[in-house]
Amino acid sequence: GLGLFDPDDPNAFVSGAGFGDAFIAAYDQLGALIWVKVIGGAGQDVVTDIAVDSNDAIYWCGNYQGTVTVVESGTTHTVSSEGADDAMVGQLAPDGTTMWLRSFGGTDSDNATALSVGDNGVAVCGEFLGTMDAEPGTGQQLLTSAGFRDAFIVRLTPFGSYAGAWSYGGTQNDYANDVAFDAAFAWYLAGTFSGTLLNGFSGTPMLQSVGSEDAFLICT
């Protein structure tokens, strides 16, 4: 389809690549369009969160289906989903140029819900079902849900390299809603869970819900 992002030019349409594409647009203080970046492929693509670091680099995360390709100044950035939906995260320069694009997921539906940035990189949180590979590079770091959907957090360096991954959940649905860093680069993960919340690596019980669904906050 077509999108209109410039309020001063009713004819400046931008074309999408498929069924539904994501976008990131920059505007000045007066609301004038500076640039717009369309992110997507033939499937449904969504940006769920965005943040800017101290160097004005722009980080974003979202979900996609199929293949997403971004061609920038002769460089091609491509990610392909392993299943129904996979999580994706990218970095843009202040002028909107794509610096890197990464993806992680498995054969089931995996969603990135939020991110947080600091001087040492970016953390992305979300939820997954079944088994997902949290390593966006050539290596492999498998996370396996304990039941239905589990919460995850994946950390990447400012250059998009893998820096760690964790999962939390139990036999019912568990969701990660937001993530944040403090000044010491400890991260905080907030979400909801039902039943028993387990550490995904050790299997150690961490929390027990009082009702059908409770909130959790994890710091490490």
Image (cartoon, rainbow, N blue to C red):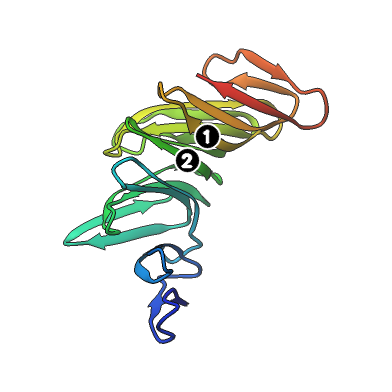
Q: Is residue 16 left or right of residue 107?
A: left
> Which residue type does callout 1 highlight?
Val
Query: Where is 122 relative to 200, above or below?
Result: below
Visible residue check, residue 6: yes
Q: Which mark is residue 115?
A: 2
- Tell me the CA gap for discs 1 and 2: 6 Å
Q: Position of residue 208 (x, y in %)?
A: 74, 19
> Which residue type does callout 2 highlight?
Leu
- Indicate the quadrant where residue 33 lies: bottom left
Q: Position of residue 122 (x, y in %)?
A: 39, 36
SS for callout 2: strand
SS for callout 1: strand
Query: Where is 141 relative to 69, above or below?
Result: above
Could you tell which of marks 1 and 2 lies nearer the N-terminus? 2
- Indicate the quadrant where residue 217 lies: top right
Q: Which mark is residue 112?
A: none
Which one is nearer the viewer's eye here, 27 or 24? 27
Q: Residues within 10 Å of mark 2 (few under 14, many from 20)?
A: many
Whether residues under marks 1 and 2 lie with C-beta atoms below 8 angstroms apart, the answer is yes
Residue plotted at (41% across, 76% down): 6
Residue plotted at (76% across, 23% down): 209
Visible residue check, residue 82: no
Query: Where is 69 relative to 159, above or below?
Result: below
Q: Which residue is mark 1?
A: 179
Q: Position of residue 7 (x, y in %)?
A: 45, 78
- Indicate the quadrant where residue 14 lies: bottom left
Q: Position of residue 52 (x, y in %)?
A: 38, 46
